[in-house]
Amino acid sequence: MELDLEHYRDSHICVAVSGGKDSMTLLHALCAAAPSYGVKVFAMNCDHRIRPTSADDSAFVAKYCEERGIRCFSYAYDGVEPFRGEEAAREWRLTCYLDAQNRMCASFACIATAHHLEDNAETLLFNLARGSGLNGARGIHDDRVPVYGTDDEGRRKSLGVVNLIRPIIEWSQKDIDEYALAHDVPYVEDETNSTDMYTRNKIRHGVIPALEEAVPGATAALLRFTSIVNSTENDLSFDAQRLVSDTPGGYTIDLCRNRTLFTRAAIIVFERLRIKDYTMTTLYLLYGLQNFEVGKTFRFSGLCAYKEKNRLAICREEARDCEDVPFMLAVGQKSYYNELCYIKPWRKSYRLESVEADVRGEVDPFPDSILELRFDMDQIPDGAVVRFMREGDVFTKFGGGTKNLAAYFTNKKIPLRLRKRIPLVAEGNRVLIVGGVEISDYVSITPETVNPYSIICCDYKNI
């Protein structure tokens, strides 16, 4: 059998190689087909340090690649604690994939895994048995997978996206066995594949052979089914993507009466927020939230959904109160700090004259819409601080008229989920500046102003 790599022409492909028969066969087949398509082949090995023989397997892969001039990226887990479950191991493996993808330095680089026909059938049956929806019926397919890590303070952050491809997904295990035998492909045995300790192995060794015996060609038919589902899902996802928008702390979904389209949009949000423990009941409750009045909320799985005008907002509960919020101070046309400042909500406040916030040289995280508010720095009283909303805050609007800050936000139609994220300049309970919204009459620019400043934030009125 030969691989058709037309879809990956002129790309760089790195094969995830464990040393087992499937991945070694994929590496051999890719190297054989690559010259015809202008493809450059690399290899990588991830030693999870779970099995006693894993180090020997990694050494086997490294030696094989060295003898054949294949550049191989090697990774070994160095954590103090072993992985807690398969998901943790997968998260680590994805970071290795991303690193290898970046090290290939190509306009298009991807990671190839050796999933095959029976793997696809096993995954499909496993997902359906758990009550999966349409997304779980997609089986194994080429995909773009987001990768996450943590920053120095333990908060989750996006690292990038891995391009995963499955060049031998249409090959059966028999095809792989015959190829390996015909081309004398060396490999090592993974002892865990022969046991029924894991649910997937029970499906692989028991269910799929029985299914093939009862319905010859069943695994190939399941692959055709997942291909149909993928095509339908791609079309649905394209339309659903247009309902989803970024917002501070999460995402919004435009109101939509098509339940299938709306629930797919919600699943897209869950995927971006890395939420997996949702059910169809959760999706139906979210869909029903559209029928309630503005301000209604629904909490689930560490998230909070807010009904707003013409949309639902879905945010992490902790992001609502604990995510760093960016702002910038400027004097005239020049930024007072050359970088953005970040206020940490778990700190009580920051003195305005020093702005004891983190200052970082990151890419501007503001949305397209920002608002610059100019004010007279000399009118800011000593002891004024930068902080977030507190009970009892009052605000005197530009032009006069004092209101409770909560009532002011309601009047300005500022969504509930944003109110505790908006940087304020305040003295006691007297709010002088509502970042990204309005300044108080007390600190307005006048002809006598000699020390004009600006505070630049998200335009919270138009998010």
Image (tube, rainbow, N blue to C red):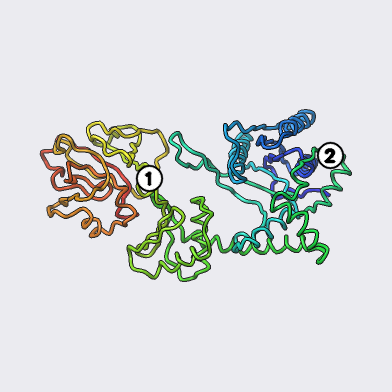
How many C-alpha atoms fall within 10 Å of the one at disc 2: few (<14), some, or many (≥20)? some
| Amino acid bearing label 1 | Phe
Q: Note whether residue 35 is visible.
A: no
Which residue is depicted at the point 27% across and 59% down?
413
Element carrying mark 1: loop
Q: Viewed as shown, does residue 143 lie left or right of 389?
A: right
Whether pointer 2 and pointer 1 mark residues with C-beta atoms closer than 8 Å, the reply is no
For the residues labelled 2 and 1, the Cα–Cα distance comes to: 53 Å
Q: Viewed as shown, does residue 434 lie left or right of 200?
A: left
Which residue is depicted at the point 65% across and 62% down?
129
Task: Work out whether mark 2 precedes mark 1 in sequence or the reverse, and give the earlier one.
Answer: 2
Q: Pick the quarter of the image with the C terminus.
A: bottom left
Horizontal and vertical percent position of residue 330: 27, 36
Q: Report which quarter residue 128 is drawn in.
A: bottom right
Q: Comparing marks 2 and 1, which lies closer to the viewer?
A: 2
Task: In the displayed orientation, state which residue is furthest to the left.
Answer: 448
Horizontal and vertical percent position of residue 319: 39, 48
Q: Nearer the viewer, residue 171 or 336?
A: 171
Task: In the displayed orientation, state which residue is furthest to the front.
Answer: 197
Q: Viewed as shown, does residue 278 lie left or right of 107?
A: left
Q: Report which quarter residue 447 is drawn in.
A: top left
Q: Which residue is mark 1?
A: 366
Q: Note whether residue 257 is visible.
A: yes
Q: Report which quarter residue 226 is drawn in.
A: bottom right
* Total marks in image: 2
Element carrying mark 2: loop
Q: Nearer the viewer, residue 424 or 448?
A: 424
Q: Which residue is mark 2?
A: 185
Horizontal and vertical percent position of residue 103: 61, 33
| Amino acid bearing label 2 | Val
Task: In the displayed orientation, state which residue is furthest to the right.
Answer: 182
